[in-house]
Amino acid sequence: MTAPLSTRFAHPGLAALACGILLSSCGGGGGGGAPAPVLALPTLSQLDATATSANAASSSEETALTVDAVIDRTSAVAMAMPAGVVSATVACAGGGNATVSISGGTLDGELDGQLDAGEHYSVVFAQCGDSAGSGRLNGSAELDVVSADRSTSPQTLALHLSVDHLELAQPSGTVTLDGTASASRSVTTGNGMTTTVSHISVPSATLATAFNGRGARFTVSDLDATHTVTAVDGVTTASRFDGRMTLTGSADGRSLSLTFATTGNVTHDGSGALVSGTWTVVRPDATITTTVANGLVFMTTDDGNEGTIDHTWTSTSAELQAAAG
């Protein structure tokens, strides 16, 4: 039987110990107890801050990049369809193939090799690469073309799409996307240069990544981003990303729950290497601000989200990108 509370601390030494544990005042007279100690907030390590920042930035950009790749490859295989058919398996420019079925439009439109308003594309990619070698697609996609205007400059295109276990394998790693998205884009071409500006919205999707020998799995929600790609003779020379999203999941054993937002454009060179930009990641326990310039990364953390800078760290852009996954 449990002893009454009044008898459990009958021994004076135990009573004193209990008083100390409870941080309360014991005894009479004019004496007062010692003030309760101020508990220090947990601090975010540089390793965790860098991994969080890298995964947030790469996840948002790779989601947009994968959506763009689906649109680009679908456009390319539509142009390569055999004459007079609306369903076929087509060789991709960089190897592999895509099985395409077109419906929903006029017969003339479905056979013109272009994405036209009202058309629906069902595509299954199998190691489908592009001529620039920017990555291979595997998996399936459904695309509904909302509008398309090739008579103006820039040319415009808007569509809705859903992807099922859509994998984009690149030299830097692999991403696999499941979910829905909307995209509107403009394409300007002149003097051998093409600039494609895509506004991409993803209400919810799952994203699995494999970078730097590590795996991660996330839920991406409320992604709203603008992805701009500049290419010369079909080869990407630079890209820019500006956007925000909410991310939950885990990477390399770390649980993540955060919001991400860029400040202006985050830029990459033609190989995908990070060049410049600033973004902020807000976790329940800290705010991380990352700025990249001239190959260096400047990172600050606000532990507890109190509006003060608690740590400042410097590293390289290569080290930051190596922390993803």
Image (cartoon, rainbow, N blue to C red):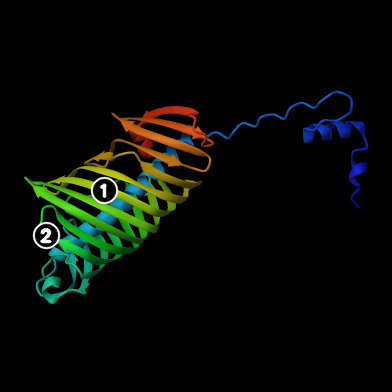
Furthest residue toward front: 30
Q: Quadrant of the C terminus?
A: top left
Whether residue 323 appears in this view of the structure is no
| Nearest to the observer: residue 300 or residue 59 | 300
What amino acid is at disc 1? Answer: His
Residue at position x 10%, y 49% in the image: 189
| Relative side of 249 to 148, left or right | right
Q: Which mark is residue 227?
A: 1
What amino acid is at disc 2? Answer: Arg
Q: Point out the tag, 2 or 1, that comes first from the N-terminus.
A: 2
Residue at position x 21%, y 74% in the image: 103
Find disc 2 in the rendering and name its residue. Answer: 150
Residue at position x 18%, y 53% in the image: 186
Near mark 2 (Cα within 10 A), the count class, few <14, some 14-19 or many ≥20, is some
Residue at position x 43%, y 50% in the image: 247
- Label 2 close to label 1 by CB (< 8 Å): no
Q: Is residue 288 above or below residue 67?
A: above
Q: Is residue 186 above or below residue 28?
A: below
x and y percentages locating residue 68 in the rendered image? 25, 54
Which element is circle 1 on?
strand
